[in-house]
Image (cartoon, rainbow, N blue to C red):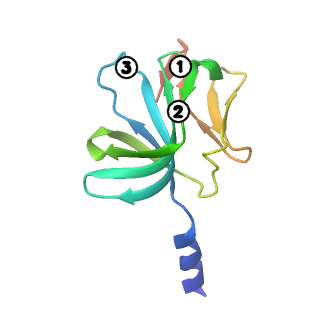
Amino acid sequence: MAGSDSQKRADLPIIWKVRTIKNYPEAHNHILVGRVLQITDSYIRLHCRTYHYGRIVTRPEDIKIGSVMVRVVPWSRVEIINELPPTFDYVRSTLLATGEGQVLFTDGKNAEPIGEIASKRQVSY
């Protein structure tokens, strides 16, 4: 039954990792991770958690985690969007450091990078 598969997909939440544009090169990076509530021509509305970090990230303590709440982001501020698995638990996710100095956020089943560490130990995308 193709209809029931389509219905099951429609019932699953859409979870996005959104990176926003920085105002200037020295500004902190901002990532929002959460459930898409609304998409309009002007903005996206998310129930999400935020991650704020500078250019050098080698351990979880280098990242500030914001509260889970509803946020509205204008499309003009969105740099990139990654769709995460619909089962990703962004509310209970935690940070995890790898041996290579990379920091991931994980819900215990899935792990997503905050950023990749370049040879000079700076975050790059």
Q: Position of residue 104 (x, y in %)?
A: 63, 33
- Res. 118 mark: 1
Q: Give the residue type at disc 1.
A: Ala
Q: Is residue 63 left or right of residue 74?
A: right
Q: Position of residue 73 (x, y in %)?
A: 35, 44
Residue shown at 36% from the left, 46% from the top: 72
Q: Secondary structure at mark 1?
A: loop
Q: Give the residue type at disc 2.
A: Gly
Q: Secondary structure at mark 3?
A: loop
Q: Position of residue 6 (x, y in %)?
A: 54, 78
- The reply to whether the C-beta atoms of the residues labelled 2 and 3 are less than 8 Å apart is no
Q: Is residue 58 above or below residue 125?
A: above
**Earlier sequence position, callout 2 versus callout 3:** 3
**Earlier sequence position, callout 2 versus callout 1:** 2
Q: Give the residue type at disc 3.
A: Ala
Image quarter (top left, top right, bottom left or bottom right) of the N terminus: bottom right
Q: Is residue 77 left or right of residue 57?
A: left
Residue shown at 54% from the left, 42% from the top: 68
For the residues labelled 2 and 3, the Cα–Cα distance comes to 17 Å
Q: Is residue 23 left or right of residue 90?
A: left
Q: Is residue 124 above or below residue 37?
A: above
- What residue did someone put label 3 on? 27
Q: Quadrant of residue 92?
A: top right
